[in-house]
Amino acid sequence: MTAERAEGVVRAVVVTDGRLLLVPEPAGWGLPSGIPQPAETPQATAARVVYELTGYLADGTEALDPGDDDGGTTILCRLLTESPTDGGSLTPDHLRWASVEETADTPLPAPVRHYLEGHTPPI
């Protein structure tokens, strides 16, 4: 079995306690996202991007159903640490943990919205 190499933008979906991790983007808030390095799997890209941006250690576990035609991949990630290290380019006060309701105006890919609606408890 060979690992699938990532292509296009890889987005990381990190949900903890019913809240989604968002990072600042030019037009508001969005998912931690990045471009894969050569021969990097989508799961490894997602974990790396989460760490580089936020300082949280994460494990890219599974790809969400594509659902969008943007050529990117969306990976569900599980946090491995409760707090970020100093390794992230963003400080904790520049991160947002948002409930599903708080993401109503955030442009999220359809597979992410579908996942959130079915897998996050009401607050």
Image: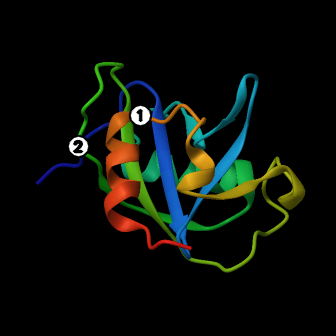
Is 98 situated above or below 28?
Answer: below
Marked residue nearer the N-terminal end (2 or 1): 2
- Above or below, 122 against 97 in this view is below
CA gap, disc 2 and disc 1: 10 Å
Query: Residue at label 2?
Result: 65
Q: Position of residue 38 (x, y in %)?
A: 44, 32
Q: Residue at horizontal 45%, vertical 61%? A: 77
Report the front residue among 31 and 39.
31
Query: Left or right of 53: which side holds 75?
Result: left
Judged from the image, the secondary structure of the residue bearing numbered disc 2 is: loop
Furthest toward the left, the residue is: 1
Q: Amino acid at mark 1?
A: Pro
Residue 64 image position (x, y, % from top left): 29, 48
**What amino acid does circle 2 point to?**
Asp
**Residue name at image x 89 percent, y 57 percent:** 93
Residue 39 at what x, y percent from top left? 38, 37
**Neighbour class for label 2 at 10 Å: few (<14), some, many (≥20)?**
some
Report which quarter residue 83 is drawn in: bottom right
Residue placed furthest toward the top: 70
Q: Badges 2 and 1: C-beta atoms under 8 Å apart?
A: no
